Image (cartoon, grey):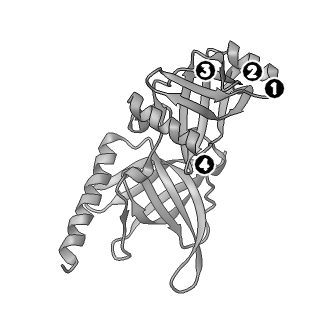
Amino acid sequence: MPASETRRPAPAGNERFLIHSPAEIARVLRRLMQQRALISAHIDGGRTLLTTAVVLVDAQRDLVALDQSHDPLINQRVMAASKLFCVSKLETVEVKFTLSGISDARLQGEPVFRTHLPPTIFYPQQREYFRLSLPRTAPLHCKVLVEEGCWIDLRVVDISVGGLGVVDYAGDAPLRSGVIYPQCRMALPGMGEVIFDLEVRSVFEVTMQRGDPVKRAGCAFHNLSHAHAALVQRYINQQQVELRRTTPD
């Protein structure tokens, strides 16, 4: 199967992106509530879907309230479920968490589901990482396996410990938002090669200085080992030192 057709969910066990602090978990849930973000809550192994939203977060009482469905059958199935597997987005960044202890309740006279704060939230806050823009004089290239036996070479225009920004100057990269491309490779000069799965978060068109449109993609690392993450951070630090050395005061 072509790599571009292989969809895999972000690994829920990726410790770098798991939030454990109840205060931080409540903060993320409140942002979902404030932005009126829709939540896809799955039960029955994904066979039943509840589209809902957070309507109350009370960390002191270990309480979260969600909208109920207009479909009584879905509400019954949610009440009978031991867990709700929830997926949402904050500013295009995917948020995942699991809720348990679901019960029926009322909020200002309206029916809601009452549940506990989730024990963890998966939230890859990519913008928390410092992102280094790379000059054309110090190019990096990412090799992406788009289908079996077919590799493409993309120019890296910015990099952080969380991911990459890449540009397709050749115009032949069939990158698709939401797809994870496995076993990508990138050589860091003087440090070695790092290997990772790459999730494409966004694909958009930009116009270069000479007026030519090119495709640019914002991507996130997956399954980047601690050793390779340390190499990426070391490379970023090295480039910052070099930039300070060559930039006039």
Q: Amino acid at mark 4?
A: Val
Q: Amino acid at mark 3?
A: Arg
Crowd rating for badge 4 (residues with CA inside 10 Å; few <14, some 14–19, many 20+): many
Q: Nearer the viewer, residue 8 or 201?
A: 201
Q: Are marks 1 and 2 in contact (CB under 8 Å)?
A: yes
Query: Residue 13 at what x, y percent from top left?
Result: 46, 30
Residue 221 in the figure: left or right of residue 229:
right
Query: Residue 62 at what x, y percent from top left?
Result: 48, 21
Mark 4 or mark 3: whose residue is earlier in sequence: 3
Mark 2 or mark 3: whose residue is earlier in sequence: 2
Q: Which-is-in-front pick, marks 4 and 3?
A: 3
Element assignment for label 2: helix
Crowd rating for badge 1 (residues with CA inside 10 Å; few <14, some 14–19, many 20+): few
On the rendered image, what quadrant is the N terminus found in?
A: top right
Residue marked by disc 2: 75
Mark 3 or mark 1: whose residue is earlier in sequence: 1
Q: Is residue 37 visible?
A: yes
Q: Residue furthest bottom?
A: 210
Element assignment for label 3: strand
How far apart are the alpha carbons under marks 4 and 1? 32 Å
Label ID, residue 114: 3
Task: Give me the residue at 75% from left, 21% from top.
Answer: 75
Q: Which-is-in-front pick, marks 4 and 2?
A: 2
Q: Nearer the viewer, residue 178 or 111?
A: 111
Residue marked by disc 4: 179
Mark 4 or mark 1: whose residue is earlier in sequence: 1
Residue marked by disc 1: 71
Q: Amino acid at mark 1?
A: Asp
Q: Are marks 4 and 2 in contact (CB under 8 Å)?
A: no
Q: Residue 176 falls in which quadrant of the image?
A: bottom right
